[in-house]
Amino acid sequence: MGIHFKQGDTFDFEAYLGWLGQAYKEPAFSRLSAVDFALSLYWQPREKWQLSLSSDRTLNETTLSDSSGYLETALDLDISYQLTSNIHLTLFSGLALFDYLDTTRKDKTNLAGVAASYQIGKFASLRAQADWSKNRTDGGGSPLDEVGSNDYTMKRILLSLDIIL
């Protein structure tokens, strides 16, 4: 079941709610049954400001031998400002929760960053981005000597050139 509401170019909201299920031939893995959802909100409160909020749940495969996959629930927020006609500044943050199936392991990732993009004519743009992310795991389902082995903090600086053909 879903809904989509749009008001001009300044407001767009879309959401759905459903149920997902998956069964596995491997008897060691239990049947998955969970609420499935997504939402997306775009709002332009003022001429040069844009706000985007999104959340969704997905079922993903994993390389862990004792888990058939994991449910990822994500929430993302972007706030953008158009400094000039070809320069955009963006602040962004996110949270993702990972619930591994057939095990007690649960991970959590936080993300925050800032970006600036410069439009070079019609066919190219240059983007600089700095971000920080932290992943924490409770270690559930891992051997005792591996508890916390998936915890990390990452800091990145990225520069990209996008060309539209």
Image: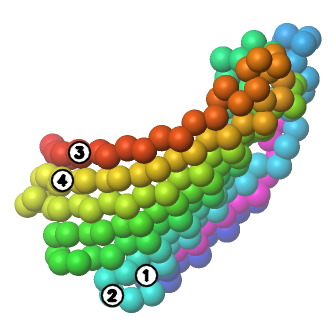
| Amino acid marked by disc 2 | Glu
Front of the two marks 1 and 3: 3
The correct choice, above or below, for 108 with respect to 142 in the image is below
The percent coordinates of residue 90 (x first, y second) are 36, 66
For the point 67% across and 26% down, which residue is it? 149
Q: CA distance from mark 3 to mark 2?
A: 27 Å
Q: CA distance from mark 1 to mark 4?
A: 23 Å
Q: CA distance from mark 4 to mark 3?
A: 6 Å
Give the mark nearest the N terminus, 4 or 2: 2
Report which residue position mark 4 lands on.
126
Task: Classify 10 Å Cα crowding around label 2: few (below 14), some (14-19), many (20 and above).
Answer: few
Residue at disc 1, secondary structure: loop
Q: Main secondary structure of the magenta part?
A: strand
| Amino acid marked by disc 3 | Ser
Give the mark nearest the N terminus, 1 or 3: 1
Q: Mark 2 near mark 1, Cβ–Cβ under 8 Å?
A: yes
Report which residue position mark 3 lands on.
160
Of residues 4 and 162, the one nearer the viewer is 162
Report which residue position mark 1 lands on.
44
Judge whether residue 133 can be spotted in this image. Answer: yes
Quarter of the picture containing the C terminus is top left
Task: Classify 10 Å Cα crowding around label 1: few (below 14), some (14-19), many (20 and above).
Answer: some
Q: Which residues, given as a range, are shown in magenta? A: 12-21
Q: CA distance from mark 2 to mark 1?
A: 7 Å
Residue at disc 3, secondary structure: strand
Of residues 1 and 115, the one nearer the viewer is 115
Q: Quick check: 141 left or right of 109?
A: right
Q: How is the image coloured?
A: rainbow
Front of the two marks 1 and 4: 4
The percent coordinates of residue 28 (x first, y second) are 90, 13
Of residues 131 and 32, the one nearer the viewer is 131
- Residue 47, numbered label: 2
